[in-house]
Image (spheres, rainbow, N blue to C red):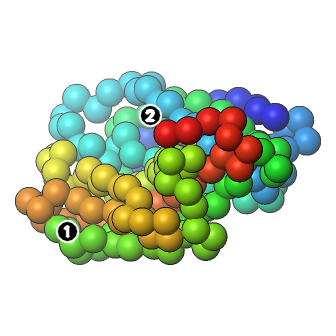
Amino acid sequence: SFQTYYTRLAPSTVTNFSYLPYTGGQTGTNAVPFVTTNLGNADTTNDFWNKYLVDVSLNSTGVRINRTLSNATSLNIRVTVIEFGSSSVRVQKGSFSRATPGKGTYVVIPTPVILSAAALVFYYASNDSTDDYTDNSIRAGFVNTTYINFTESASATSGLKNGSWYVFESLDGSFTV
């Protein structure tokens, strides 16, 4: 099943979040969120990347969206939650935290995956207060069948990043990657 949720995060100088209860019978058990955002209004004083980064996590009752240091920028968010049948797709999820720029953060995938049948999506918020893209960007990928590595640019200098990851894997050959 799938359901789409909309919210707007207002400007704030502290962490702000939105909680969206599930509708249509979703449980979040075997689900992955897919997120798009756009600015509600722009802060013309600077271009801090952290204003546009959101962590999106799922629990048994709804979707939680978190952002830090948004200043004068509101953000429109659309989250489509797809809940898969457990016999067709296995979803594994977890969280990560990055505090040391230039070094990898490894997380364990609880059940090993078949890499040709698995995909990764992740979301994160950053408290970095510079306007540098390199201080706020993270890339992630499978190291092997049991680990994901999250890294930043070697030139990144600051900021704590907290996020959520989702691995979804075809169990019946319905998709390959």
**Residue 84 left/right relative to 139:** right
The residue positioned 41% from the left and 27% from the top of the image is 39
| Circle 2 Cα neighbour tier, 10 Å, few/some/many (<14 / 14–19 / ≥20) | many
23 in relation to 42, above or below? below
Is residue 7 among what the camera can see?
no
The residue positioned 23% from the left and 43% from the top of the image is 48
Task: Determine the CA span between mark 2 and mark 1.
Answer: 28 Å
Q: Quadrant of residue 1?
A: top right
Is residue 177 among what the camera can see?
yes
**Residue 44 left/right relative to 144:** left
- Along the line of sight, the residue nearer the viewer: 93 or 24: 93
- Along the line of sight, the residue nearer the viewer: 118 or 5: 118
Badge 1 element = loop
Residue 72 location in percent, x, y? 35, 38
Q: Which residue is mark 2?
A: 74
| Circle 1 Cα neighbour tier, 10 Å, few/some/many (<14 / 14–19 / ≥20) | many
Residue 46 location in percent, x, y? 18, 37
Residue 139 location in percent, x, y? 31, 52
The residue positioned 50% from the left and 47% from the top of the image is 116
Q: Amino acid at mark 1?
A: Pro
Q: Nearer the viewer, mark 2 or mark 1?
A: 1
Q: Which residue is mark 1?
A: 101
Q: Quick one: label 2 or label 1, which is nearer the N terminus? A: 2
Residue 90 location in percent, x, y? 70, 54
Q: Are marks 2 and 1 in contact (CB under 8 Å)?
A: no
Q: Amino acid at mark 2?
A: Ser
Q: Quadrant of residue 3?
A: top right
Q: Residue furthest left?
A: 155
